[in-house]
Amino acid sequence: GAGVSQTPSNKVTEKGKYVELRCDPISGHTALYWYRQSLGQGPEFLIYFQGTGAADDSGLPNDRFFAVRPEGSVSTLKIQRTERGDSAVYLCASSYSSGNTDTQYFGPGTRLTVL
Amino acid sequence: KNEVEQSPQNLTAQEGEFITINCSYSVGISALHWLQQHPGGGIVSLFMLSSGKKKHGRLIATINIQEKHSSLHITASHPRDSAVYICAVRSLAGTASKLTFGTGTRLQVTL
């Protein structure tokens, strides 16, 4: 009965490096969401998957950010050439489907610090 | 102006007090969510509303669609209620599934 899990829980990297953040959704959930939460702010939408495809990636801030979900389960958020402004908590959520009545279940987040 | 505004930003209450957190939004929505986030912890969904009122234990959430406003009430508050409470909406425009969040209300309940 595992919930949404995210790894790593903390990631410290240097400016310019590449990072990958992983999300394991609840088994059977077809919808998966990535959000980013800066200190003192509410989460902001990044990208949403329905199955294997990105249904909406309008929240990705620029082309350094990319996400995949090749088998419709685990998703990886990839950030190239990291910048200090990328420091935030990256949250993943999943839901059974993408309907308006579906509850999103959140993971604990990955805290990314770019030095 | 943010699509979702919460007030107050910070709230300190004594144990036992009745607490109200407000959320206003500026877009048409299909649903509104109240979420709870503990320090260093994940986010837990408390309520999802599209109309009226819902109650769960000491928590009550109401929404007025015409006024684009929702409130979260906590009765008989307790120190374990200390957390950040976040309002989020599902907009009718664009991707209906994604959530747009308020900045949160940080609640501290003291003994």
Image: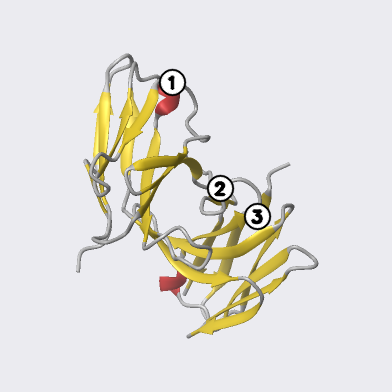
Instruction: Residue B20 in the image: state x and y as whole percent.
Output: 64, 71
| Quadrant for the N terminus of chain B in the image | top right
Please state which amino acid type lies under the numbered disc 3: Leu
Neighbours of disc 1 within 10 Å: few (<14), some (14-19), many (20+):
few
Along the line of sight, which residue is nearer the eye, B14 or B32? B32
Please state which amino acid type lies under the numbered disc 1: Asp
Asked if A101 appears above or below B103 in the picture, the reply is below
Answer with left or right where residue B72 lies relative to residue A75: right
Q: CA distance from mark 1 to mark 2?
A: 20 Å
Q: Chain of mark 3?
A: B
Q: Which mark is residue A63?
A: 1
Please state which amino acid type lies under the numbered disc 2: Thr
Q: Which mark is residue B95?
A: 2
Which image quadrant is residue B60 in? bottom right
In the image, are marks 3 and 2 on the same chain?
yes
Along the line of sight, which residue is nearer the eye, B98 or B100? B98
Instruction: Residue A7 in the image: state x and y as whole percent.
Output: 22, 43
Along the line of sight, which residue is nearer the eye, B78 or A111? A111
In the image, are marks 1 and 2 on the same chain?
no
Q: CA distance from mark 3 to mark 2?
A: 8 Å
Asked if B76 appears above or below A30 in the picture, the reply is below
In the image, are marks 3 and 1 on the same chain?
no
Answer with left or right where residue A23 lies relative to residue B57: left
Element on which disc 3 rests: loop
Q: How is the image coloured?
A: secondary structure
Q: Chain of mark 1?
A: A
The residue positioned farthest toward the right in the image shown: B67
Asked if B21 appears above or below B5 in the picture, the reply is below
Instruction: Residue A51 in the image: state x and y as whole percent.
Output: 34, 49
Which image quadrant is residue A1 in? bottom left
Q: Which mark is residue B92?
A: 3
Residue at 72% over, 52% down: B27
